[in-house]
Image: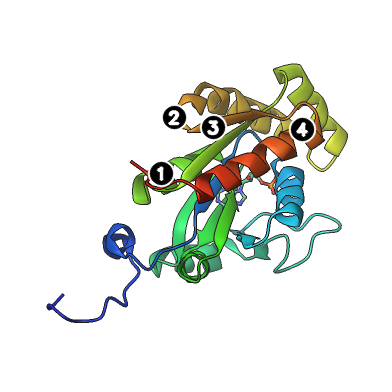
Amino acid sequence: MNAGEPLTKLGPEAEMADTRIKGDLLVITGPSGVGKGTLVERIIERVDHLKQSVSVTTRPMRPGEKEGQSYFFRTRAEFEAMVKNGEFMEWAEFAGHLYGTPRAWVYEQLNEGEDVILEIEVQGAKQVHSLYPPAVLIFISPPSFEELEERLRLRGTESEEKIQQRLAKAREELLERNIFQYEVVNDVLDSAVTKLVHIVYAERYRLNTA
Ligand code: 5GP
């Protein structure tokens, strides 16, 4: 880039240097079934200037889900084309399906001073961590592994095979939680929400990220 040229590009090279990025990027991660989705819904209700990114997925729509609200539902070919075009901030394969975070929307919001929450699985969270080190990584743990298994079964949305895949993945993910800055155990919903709200505000008042 030439001196004096306006910094308009928001690719990985610009991410760290661009002082216009004003919002916090918060990444909520943890095993499938731990209740990340409900927690995020509740935090968004309680905190202003905090928005959730809507991911793209190749997973089939579940009853009650809506295009553009729960996810953007796409075919594998469409998803792969988006990967080629560099449209994702991060993406990962999870239990046989692809999931990704649209890059442009996230940076637009951060630049406008909004805080953004990504609710994603652990591989994606690790990608965000290396691509964008100021991101605040929060790991949601189940009170116990048995409880997680029960929650996945109660949800009743997956076949036994898929439940087993998700449980195996959860065992791996629980081993990786030490790389994150915060851990919140989702034992009692209201108290977990309060802890997360405190984290969001604490990060807003932080003077530097070093
Ligand atoms: P589900 O199929 O239950 O909606 O989501 C499965 C897993 O994918 C969950 O752990 C969820 O947090 C994660 N996920 C949802 N969107 C994304 C995304 O954009 N990127 C990544 N890496 N994971 C995602």
Task: Name the spot of residue 61 as percent of width and height, x first.
Answer: 76, 58
Please identify the quadrant where the C terminus is shown: top left
Q: Amino acid at mark 1?
A: His
As measured in the structure, the alpha-carbon distance from the residue carrying label 3 to the one carrying label 4 is: 15 Å
Residue 148 coordinates in the image, percent (x, y):
74, 26
Identified at 80% across, 36% down, the residue is 190
Disc 2 to disc 3, C-alpha distance: 9 Å
Q: Earlier in the sequence, mark 3 or mark 1?
A: 1
Which secondary structure lies at badge 1? helix
Q: Earlier in the sequence, mark 2 or mark 4?
A: 2
Quadrant placement of the N terminus? bottom left
Dot placed on the residue nearer the N-terminal end, 1 or 2: 1
Secondary structure at numbered mark 2: helix
Query: For numbered disc 3, what is the local secondary structure?
Result: strand
Neighbourhood count class around disc 1 (C-alpha, 10 Å): few under 14, some 14–19, many 20 upward: some
Pointers 1 and 2 in contact (CB under 8 A)? yes
Residue 191 got which mark? Answer: 4
Q: Which residue is mark 1?
A: 129
Q: Amino acid at mark 2?
A: Ile
Residue at point 66%, 33% (across, down): 166
Q: Position of residue 172 (x, y in %)?
A: 54, 25
Q: Position of residue 171 (x, y in %)?
A: 59, 22
How many numbered callouts? 4
Q: Which mark is residue 182?
A: 3
* Mark carried by residue 179: 2
- The reply to whether the residue tagged 2 has its Cβ within 8 angstroms of ligand 1 is no
Q: At label 4, which amino acid type do we have?
A: Ser
